[in-house]
Amino acid sequence: MSKIKWKIEYEKGVICQNFERRGWTRTEGEDWNVFWATVGTVKQIFNPDSGMRLGDSQLICHFPNHYELTRKDLMTKNMKRYIKEKQKEGVVVNDFVPVTYLLPADYSLFVEEFRRLPNAMWIMKPSNAAQGKGIFIINKLQQIKKWSTGRFNRDQQTYVVSRYIENPLLIGGKKFDLRIYVLITSFRPLRMYLGDGFARFCNVKYSYDVGEIDNPFMHLTNVSIQKHNEEYNNTHGGKWNVSNLRLYLESTRGLEATQKLFLDIDELLVHSAKAVQNVMINDRHCFECYGYDLLLDDDLKPWLVEVNASPSLAATTEMDKEMKSTLIRDVLDITVPDELNEGEYRGANTRGPCRDTGDFVVLYDEAAENEKIRKLEEDKLQGKEKRKSKSWK
Amino acid sequence: MPPPSDRSQHPRSSPGVALRSPPSHNPLSSPSSLPSKLSPPLSENPTLREELLSYLERDVFYLEGKAAVEKQVLGLVREDGALTSKKTNKTSLRSINDEIRAVAMERQEAMAKVVKSSRDDASREEGAAERGEEGEAKTASEKKKIRFIFDSEDLLDACKRIPATRNLGMDKDVTYGLIKVMFATPDLVDMREKFRELHPHNLQVGIDDILEDSSRFVAHRQALGLKVIEEEYIPIARQYCKYGVPSSLRGRVYRVAMGMAGSVGAKERRYFSGLTNSMKALKYPIHDELFTMDCVTTVANDMSFFPFAEPLTNVVLAFSRDDWLREMSRARANECLEHVCEDGSTIKVPASSVHPFKGFVKYASPLALTYQEEEEIYFTFRAMYASLWSKLNTISSKEGELLHVVKTFEELLFALHPGLFLHLLSIGVDPLQVAFPWIHLAFSNVLDAEQLLLLWDRLVGYDDLTILSLFAASIFLFRAEILLCCGSKEEVGNVFKGNWGRRLKVVPLLQAVLWPDVLK
């Protein structure tokens, strides 16, 4: 059995180290088994014009149309559709995405809603940007009228505008959001693993004052923004482990409220994946580790802000490096079977039920869930008969 | 530090001593009438030998004998010890006060500054500038940079300097540890008795609530905890704490165990706001800056507590204004400085008589994860300081206070693993030098927040600081293999570097050191 070969586009310490530690061989050619590619390269590979077909023993770290989940406008569309579908089926799904409109498409709808809630704040985000670029908050239509006349015609950049969550949960007076890593190895049937998470804090104390909406250091939690603040600290980088958050919430809000919050988060993650389940190209060569950004409000309700296909793997602090290293290690443990090179690998679904691995726990295994339901129903049918035969009273 | 070659001549390292001997005492602290105890070292002083031999002839049972020996043999030693440590304490207090005065002089600031009103202040400053007084007119940038007055290292140095007591005529050291003063310290058997609630046969929060079938235990603990909070009876609350407190109840249980009502009342809120208001009226230029600097450098860099930098600063500053502590602290850690105001009255600075040192805010930080409001953090912090942390900051030989606690650690470690102890000494590392910062700050600089609070649950419950000595010893035992492989001071430093303590689990370590056979 030949050694597993790996390829990477940009040197990323934690990834290279993980591959090297396994004794796998690096390659620059097309004979790779595992390719940690960028989304651009993945797009090229899966482009029908490229003529490229992935072999049995090749795994790549993105799904071809991940943007259904990771572009803000498409994510919004898919979530809205999913919630409506579920409503029709009679299943109640808690809304987990704030009210969002696509611009320029839904401009008039947005204006209507805006006028209905005159005191609300809205946040404008480019559909396809990252690291907090181009995001700003508005509370007057004037602010985007000025922008809209200039920009709409110039470039094709679409924006989404969402209700700004004005009462975020504050800790020590500061706003934070949650970054949670979720590994998905298959969409149909859905196989999801929940990884580690951390809270990213703003450096500036939050204020409800409308005059401060221009202060990104108070409202935007992206590390790429916060690290420019003079208060930014290199030791911890504003990142707080979720276990500390859990301890704090249990102490201050009680055990039940905290348990409910974390259950709600799990539900949110599963619903978000189910929403795109049927539109995703479920290529068996693909797996993806998403970076989910969630915001908690003061009533301990989780909101989905966005999903990132290429969460940053650059380590800003010691602890960060350790965490991301462990993350990649677990991802590789889960996705790459030892027999990958023997040419008989047929995809994640052929590997039996999901198992907790390292720091990842199984979030949702659709096949296993269906099996359980099927068994329950079978038992019910058989059980009735069993009970009859067992009655010897 | 040169290898302690003279120590190898010490009678204790004679071949008759087994390495893994059962817990033994200071050679002077127990009669050798019981075969399981080590025989006392051969003394060079004939009268001492006669004295000790006389004990051999007496048929004294262990416990009674221990008390009797303590009284007679150690009585002398302990009195000496008390005297010398008192002397050292006085010196160190004085030196701390001198340091602060020196800093104040350098920066030409008063100890306390009464702020009457902003208008008065401004006019006063104008008047002062006219008169050319330097104190008021100095700008911030001209002020000399302030430095910390002391920290854990300095405290340890002061403890080390306490000279050995008479040692009953022996001219060699009778102990390998850094603390030369002789005490009777609890050994493992005493600790097993004292901390019997930690026995593995008892369900503990910290272990049994995270196992698979833990829901019944968790529910039981919750229900019991709520009843304890309702009762508001200290002994019951403390007994409850000994098995660990679930995080959702910890805030209220701590308050009850410290003698307060379950939740903060109106009177307490008024008291706290009184303290915060007094901060505006009366400033301590030196102390405020030191406390704030401590918060900024310690908390802001701490991975677990950095979001709480502001509330903790407020809590610590309010703490310095509270004169309740002067009367109610179990141990007087520092002496107040006196500041003579313009109108002739004297103010004690700081009102709480606690001088800031590096890392002081660490005593309060875990409470920021337990409470939401500053008032809540404040009162529990104040109570814990008065009953627990003040004892860790006084150089006193009383039982349960700093010297006793660290001496217990040394004796315990030597008794449990003399090989490790001697190995570390031979490479120039004193175990207490490594463990002192941990014990001094009650492991707030070592453990993960959740585990730290589990340890503090037991501290609150037992109200006994020797559990810190026990935990420090258990860490050394846990890392014994690695430490035995270390060949130099740097290597030992590497073992205990960075975030090494973040994955330690408190309760299993304590159980492993107290009852190693049960857990096998």
Image (cartoon, rainbow, N blue to C red):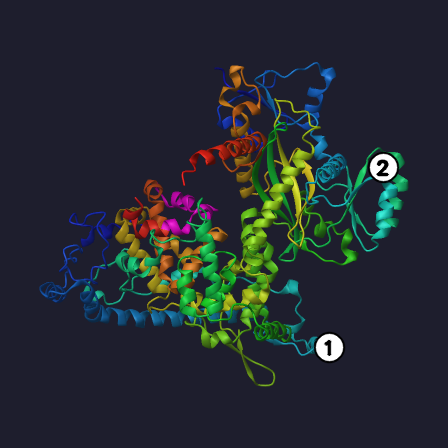
Q: Which residue is mark 2?
A: A105
For the residue pair B438 and A165, the one nearer the viewer reads as A165
For the residue pair A298 and B1, the one nearer the viewer reads as A298
Q: Please say if B132 is above or below B196.
A: below
For the residue pair A180 and A284, the one nearer the viewer reads as A284
Q: Quadrant of residue B282?
A: bottom right
Q: Chain of mark 1?
A: B
| x and y percentages locating residue B151 in the rendered image | 46, 61
Q: Chain of mark 2?
A: A
**Residue at point 48%, 66% (across, down):** B229
The answer to the question of whether label 1 and label 2 lie on touching residues, with beta carbons closer than 8 A, is no
Magenta-colored stretch includes residue B57: no
Please determine if labels 1 and 2 lie on a single subunit: no
| x and y percentages locating residue B412 in the rendered image | 29, 55
Q: Do we see residue B446 in this rendering?
A: no
Q: Quadrant of residue B83?
A: bottom left
At label 1, which amino acid type do we have?
Arg
Real-space Cα distance between discs 1 and 2? 59 Å
Q: Please say if B265 is above or below B310.
A: below
**Residue at point 81%, 36% (across, down):** A158
Q: Which mark is residue B119?
A: 1
The quadrant of the image that shows the C terminus of chain A is top left
Magenta-colored stretch includes residue B503: yes
| x and y percentages locating residue A282 in the rendered image | 65, 24
Instruction: Count the labels in the image.
Output: 2
Q: Which mark is residue A373?
A: none
Magenta region, residue range: B486-509
At label 2, which amino acid type do we have?
Ala
User: Relative to residue B465, is residue A171 drawn left or right?
Assistant: right
For the residue pair B479 and A175, the one nearer the viewer reads as A175
**Residue at point 39%, 65% (across, down):** B463
* Disc 2 crowd, CA 10 A, few/some/many (<14, 14-19, 20+): few
